[in-house]
Amino acid sequence: MKTNTEPVRIPDERLSIEKRSDGALVVRVQSEGPVDSRLPDAVFSFRCGDPQYAYWLGRLEGMLAR
């Protein structure tokens, strides 16, 4: 049985990425599903040197380039 090992990319319309004045990135992922049973949005922060910082900076730059 073949399994898909590719990560699922979160659609841009569900993301909000902010670069703060100190360089940190704040990533908000909008929850989905029925409003009455929806979980709160997920919020993450990344600083330069964090393993995922470059990925989220690239996503932010891609969103701004449109």
Image (cartoon, grey):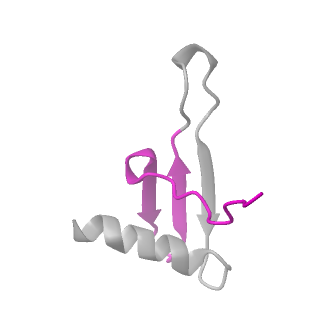
> Is residue 9 located in the magenta-colored stretch of the structure?
yes
Depth check, front residue: 56 or 48: 56
| Residue displayed at 53% across by 80% down | 54
The quadrant the C terminus occupies is bottom left
Q: Could you tell me which residue is drawn at 44 percent across and 59 percent down?
A: 17
Q: How many marks?
A: 0
Point out the residue furthest to the top here.
36
Q: Position of residue 63 (x, y in %)?
A: 32, 64
Q: Position of residue 50 (x, y in %)?
A: 67, 79
Q: Residue furthest left?
A: 66
* Residue at x-position 51% and y-position 70%: 56
Q: Position of residue 38 (x, y in %)?
A: 60, 25
Q: Residue at x 35, y 74 (%)?
A: 61
Seen in the picture, residue 41 relative to 34 is either above or below; the reply is below
- Find the magenta span and give its range: 1-30
Image location of residue 36, percent across then percent down: 58, 14
Query: From the viewer's perspective, is 14 left or right of 52?
Result: left
